[in-house]
Image (cartoon, rainbow, N blue to C red):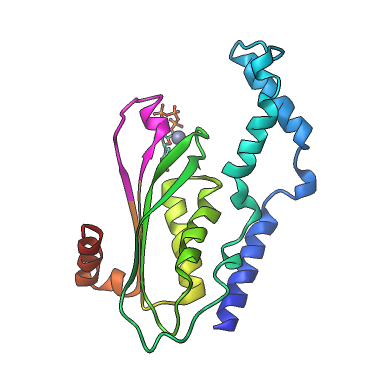
Amino acid sequence: MDAVVKAANNKDKDMAAQRPDMDARPTRAQAEDAVRTLLAYIGEDVTREGLIETPQRVIRAYDEFFKGYDEAATDYLGTIFDEVNGYDDIVLLRDIPFYSHCEHHMVPFIGHAHIAYYPKGGVVGLSKLARVIDVYARRLQTQENLSAEIATAIETALQPRGLAVMIEAEHQCMSLRGVQKAGVTTVTTRFTGVFRDNPAEQARFMTLLRR
Ligand SMILES: Nc1nc2c(ncn2[C@@H]2O[C@H](COP(=O)(O)OP(=O)(O)OP(=O)(O)O)[C@@H](O)[C@H]2O)c(=O)[nH]1
Ligand SMILES: [Zn+2]
């Protein structure tokens, strides 16, 4: 398992290497100026009292919304627990809330993720699966890419007999603007191993999601 974790670590480092270098990023002051520009663009008076500290607040909020760029899934998937008395049946986390931001409009999409796997040789801490979701959700995303990245990270670290990832989310770029269709849920799935190969396993996953 060590070799697998190491491979995952290297892969995430490779992905990090493709991202802009921290040194190449604009400074905090430049980012705050960009917010001032947007405020002026929408017709606001950037000097009025209520807005004086808004650029700083917005950048602090961005630090939270997009903190996933400074994290890697392997930060959380490095510890595998082997002592599970041979437990090899399904492990399912249902209704994990998350938010992300769509890469087209930079507005939120909000929903729930469901993750199930059949362990082979070990399990990870339950909270770590939820943390992996946020590593990728706290970046600009499409829902399809988010689903794929979560699945690849867990698959690489755990190499389970099967993995199922389902995401259900409402995209505010569809509900608040543009086509303005509120209440639409987008569902994406990613199945590997027995979940991909055996329709009965997919059916079990779906049944457990419905309780
Ligand atoms: N496949 C996919 N599309 C998304 C996601 N989030 C937003 N979109 C879509 O991205 C598309 C961008 O389309 P464009 O025509 O380039 O942009 P737009 O003019 O703002 O489009 P409208 O939203 O239709 O007004 C829209 O159809 C969005 O609904 C996502 O997670 N996955
Ligand atoms: Zn969008």
Q: Write the start and end of the magenta stretch as one range.
A: 169-187
For the residue pair 129 and 157, the one nearer the viewer reads as 129
Residue found at x 41% / y 33%: 172
Residue found at x 20% / y 65%: 203
Residue found at x 50% / y 45%: 141
| Above or below, comparing residue 42 to residue 151 in the picture | above
Using the rendered view, name the quadrant where residue 12 is placed: bottom right
Q: Is 26 left, or right, of 12 in this rendering?
A: right
Q: Position of residue 103 (x, y in %)?
A: 52, 39
Q: Is 65 left, or right, of 205 in this rendering?
A: right
- Work out which quarter of the rendered image holds the N terminus and state it: bottom right
For the residue pair 72 and 130, the one nearer the viewer reads as 130
* Residue 44 colored in magenta in the image: no
Residue ranking furthest to the front: 49
Q: Position of residue 207 (x, y in %)?
A: 20, 62
Q: Position of residue 47 (x, y in %)?
A: 72, 13
For the residue pair 83 and 62, the one nearer the viewer reads as 83
- Work out which quarter of the rendered image holds the C terminus and state it: bottom left
Q: Position of residue 176 (x, y in %)?
A: 40, 26
Q: Quadrant of ligand 2?
A: top left
Using the rendered view, name the quadrant where residue 186 is placed: top left
Residue found at x 45% / y 71%: 155
| Above or below, comparing residue 105 to residue 203 in the picture | above
Q: Is 130 left, or right, of 183 in this rendering?
A: right
Q: Is 74 left, or right, of 160 in this rendering?
A: right
* Residue 181 colored in magenta in the image: yes
